[in-house]
Amino acid sequence: MTDSLLERAPAHALLADGTTVCIRPATPGDHDRLKGFYDAMSAENLRLRFFSVSRRSAAMAADRACAPARPGYRALLAEARGQVLGLAEYETAPDADAGDAAGDGKHSAEISIAVADGLHHRGVGTLLVEHLVSAARADGITTFTADALSENGEVLRLFADLGLRTSRRFEGPQTRCTIHLDQDDTYLTAVESRGRAADVASLRPLLCPEAVAVVGAGRTPGSVGRAILHHIHTGGYTRRLFAVNPSVTSVLGVPCYPSVSALPRTPDLVVVAVPAAAVAATAEECGTAGVRALLVVTSGLDPDQAQALRTACRTHGMRLVGPNCLGISNTDARLSLDATFAAEHPRPGAAGVAVQSGGVGIALLDGLSRLGIGVSSFVSLGDKYDVSGNDMLQWWETDGRTDLALLHLESFGNPRAFSRTARRVARRMPVLTVDAGRSAAGRRAAASHTAAAATPTMTRRALFTQAGITATRSVGELLEAAALLHSQTLPEGKRVAVVTNAGGAGVLAADACAEAGLALPAFTPATAEALRAVLPGGAAVGNPVDATAAVTEAQLTDCVDALMEYPGVDAVLVALVPTALATATGDDLVRALTGAPGRRPKPVLAVRLEQDLPVRLLPAADAGGTVPSYAEPQAAARALAHAADRAAWLARPAGTVPALDDVETERARALAEAHLTAHPDGGWLDPRGCADLLACYGIPQIPWAWAETEDDAVRAADRLRGADGRVVMKAHWPGLVHKSEERAVHLDLRGEPQVRAAFRDLQTRFGDLMTGVVVQSLARRGTELFAGVVQDEVFGPLVLFGLGGTATEVLADHAARLAPLTDHDVHDLITAPRCAPLLFGTRGNGPVDLEALEHLLLRLSRMAADLPQLAEADFNPVLAAPGGVTVLDARIRLLPRLPQDPYLRRLR
């Protein structure tokens, strides 16, 4: 165990009731407080903890917890407002053997928990154990053991409900529990469930406050504080409302008080609209008064002011939205809270909206109100010091009012936790986002092929794809997709029938569908005949269907109804233009789409080229449904493609991370630690180090040998020559990445003279820089591919795959997924690049060994997940052939990084 691991940083987290606590290591300075913690315990609580009521045991426990940090022991305490709430500790046996088969060695530790009287059933012990489990895993501990009195049902239930594999053995009046610390999906799901309940409880004072105060609301027209107070007051807020201003007694008819402490009752939520220099002091005053949530709209905080605000919120357990934000809104009729300074009150409805940009928020509020979708709750996250998109997804998941989630996030605090939450929520409702930050300016400097390929766009796209999030490129596209997802049934596939009353409009719609990846299949003869029977003479019944300008409302209705019954298409897009014929007959062709009661079995979309707005929702005949209408066929096709992608994601069961045989994780970690001990700043592994690491994960390499002299190279070539007698020689020196660019490779070497000549050439050109050469067998023919990993500091390990060889960066034919890869992720990785048809067999060539390729990617993913020190891994080329898959060249870079637990419950 390293000293840095012993010094675990404090973390704030939420109890079951939404209370914020700090989880941190106990220190010698905590001794008196911990002794007081035990002294205040009832005799019964002491007996259950120490199996006796002796105060001496409690004093010894305080001494043990507050002794100087030492290997094999940890003590974590939970505190709030200076009060110790609980303590959890573990200790390994002092003289244990790490390989002890009984599980009592250095890989096992004894655990104990104590919670203060009056604080049971609030999740203190469970939260402490979760943090202790995370710390133990980082220390290499795989099992906890614990002894408890058999009558201590609370602690036995705590262990049983963790989500970890637990066994019990009864020993007289005691029960011995063994807890296995494997982090599987069962445990993560249990942690998520507890976290979701705590998160939602903590957000209630923010989004459902019983009393609100606005600090900074004055008489000056145009001030932000006054505007928010006006919005709350005129928006119909049904609970208590106050203003805080020492200079006046009322503002806009709302009673005003000189300070938060002077209010007649403590508000749940305080809106802070004061100058940046006063924000921290205001937050401290609110916390001291017992306020549970802050909305800080002030912008321009400097680093010291920002830190003081964070500290006040964490110290006093207040949830925080902002700073630098537009505000929040909850349109629930029982509350009607609109604490924003938007131009209009949002329309009540079904869409949950969370944005970082206030401008984007205003655009979405306006668009959703105009469409009639409306908003259930809105949060402008601003600089996102605390409350995040992850919090809001969990709120919408449980609020009973939201069926559409819209996000605009410019940054991610914990993408892997967000991905799990979004994946779960997206099974219940559509989750849409604007993919911000796609520009090439966001690309970081990179050395390897893998790092160069891992653009911000690719990383975010991988996150969105795996989580089932519908990612759009603009606010307009997001609203277009939301209109369809809100109003229509999801299509079962991408087959579209296009119907029009003007041939040109039909062609435009057909082109748009093709560009969006949709298909326009030909109709069967029977279907074509059925359509011909209901349409005017002269109608063309191919796909698109040209119903001609003479089509009537009744005929168009019959046509759409027939296509609803036809199993060969999944959606119907109707492109209409206004004509004098329809006007003369009094027909309204739009009614052919909106006249059916309820939702149709397939989605129906309208395109009206004369429409003034990009998208509208046309009311249906039963007044309960709507039909989306678009001004441009491209918008309709994009929205339909998004709906088809969502339907396909929902239809596919959640993937699983396959178990892998013959993986030597402990040996791999030891190799990484040994390299970083020798090279504290990290760096690229030499060929032997790369080969050893690949061998730990069963990743196949072509036979090779290391040579530092000309004679060594000749002997290596003699051993490695295949049936055709040819070998390859590659120069090596620390930091060499692109061998081809340096002309550091000799191919197709036959016989000893060519091998010697190649070595001399490399030695002459590179001199002392070259530390040796790699001699390899000449690879058989196959498809050159590329596979790699880059460890993103925010998103974690990203696995990339695509076309390889020297042109890999030029062609940029890559796909990416975040590790760990599931079986579905691997399939998507292999099929996503443009080169995919080469892998499945083309022009008479058979398919490559796809199972071996899948295994290589899974093993690469496992390596990335096991080793946080793995900064980059670059396999290029990877040779894929019908008989197997082989890595021809591997580069691996390690950096000194500690393991992180992205799923540990903690606030930002």
Image (spheres, rainbow, N blue to C red):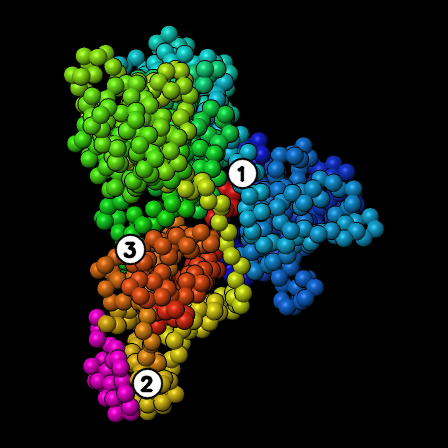
Q: For residue 594: magenta? A: no
Q: Which residue sits furthest right?
A: 172
Q: Is residue 475 above or below residue 830?
A: above
Residue 903 visible, this angle? yes
Marks 3/2: CA–CA distance: 33 Å
- Element at badge 1? helix
Label whose residue precedes the other's in the sequence (1 or 2): 1
Q: Which mark is residue 724?
A: 2
- Element at badge 2? loop
Give the magenta part as a residue range. Answer: 741-769
Q: Nearer the viewer, mark 1 or mark 2?
A: 2
Bin the neighbour count of mark 2 within 10 Å (Cα to Cα): few under 14, some 14-19, many 20 and up.
few
Q: Is residue 186 above or below residue 852?
A: above
User: Which residue sits at x=30%, y=12%?
Assistant: 219
Residue at mark 1 = 195
- Element at badge 3? loop
x then y, percent, for residue 489: 40, 30
Residue type marked 2:
Asp
Residue type marked 3:
Arg
Residue 312, quarter of picture: top left
x then y, percent, for residue 170: 79, 51
Residue at mark 3 = 834
